[in-house]
Image: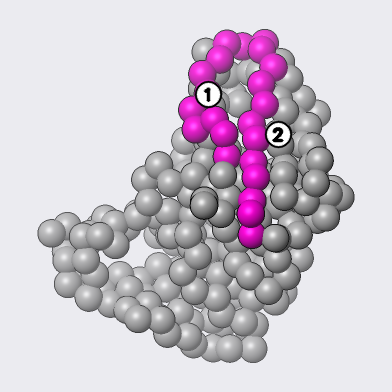
Amino acid sequence: DTAVSQTPKYLVTQMGNDKSIKCEQNLGHDTMYWYKQDSKKFLKIMFSYNNKELIINETVPNRFSPKSPDKAHLNLHINSLELGDSAVYFCASQSRVTPLHFGNGTRLTVT
Amino acid sequence: SQQGEEDPQALSIQEGENATMNCSYKTSINNLQWYRQNSGRGLVHLILIRSNEREKHSGRLRVTLDTSKKSSSLLITASRAADTASYFCATDNNDMRFGAGTRLTVKP
């Protein structure tokens, strides 16, 4: 009954590959986010969706493409992976009156 | 650009001592939130303080907010080894932006 779940937990892949990370929330929240946490622990917002509509699209390479099939899901597809994409990616959700609820992260390692 | 910037980057104290972490931000806010992150886990919400509040308590946590200085502080009293984690602030100005956090180590 995890509130925000992301899969996979670990992802190891080679440069140039395409991969996806999935996120689902069962909290009924309207807004979902993707964050990237680098090795220095800096947590940077990447995307925000509200009711399946893109709200925030930070300066992220267009190799990253979020997809929200419904408001409970926000997936992240990454094309042509690069070494610098190695990080922990966190999904989060919230409603207007609640704080953020985070998933436990996906550790992506690009070799 | 990020909003919340935590200070110090790292803090090491003995169990029983108090820990104070600071957060600065750049623009006007609706509220400011503090989160905790244990190693290998997602962030967990600790406390929210609204822009019209100056101080808020929750158990051993005390948060202050100074909107004129665009800063907030998180005080953890009587720290425990289990408080060892990274602490982040985030401002809710239509989106949620974080900094790099303060890494707190509480030695038993």
Residue type at tag 1: Leu
Is A71 in the magenta? no
Sequence-wise, the earlier of marks 1 and 2 is 1
The quarter in which the C terminus of chain B is drawn is bottom left
Which residue is drawn at the image coordinates 72% and 42% (left, top)?
A74
- Figure quadrant of residue A108: top right
The numbered disc on residue A76 is: 2
Segment colored magenta: A6-27
Q: Secondary structure at mark 1?
A: strand
Query: Are dots 1 and 2 on a single chain?
Result: yes
Residue at the image point whose x is 52% and y is 51% from the top: A2
Q: CA distance from mark 1 to mark 2?
A: 13 Å
**Tag shown at residue B56:** none
Q: Residue furthest front?
A: A1
Residue B27 seen from this side:
no
Q: Residue at x 35, y 81 (%)?
A: B59
Q: Is residue B43 visible?
A: yes
Residue at the far right: name it: A53
User: Is A87 left, or right, of B60 in this rendering?
Assistant: right
**B72 above or below B14?**
below
Towards the viewer: A69 or B104: A69
Tell me the residue at 76%/65% (across/down): B94
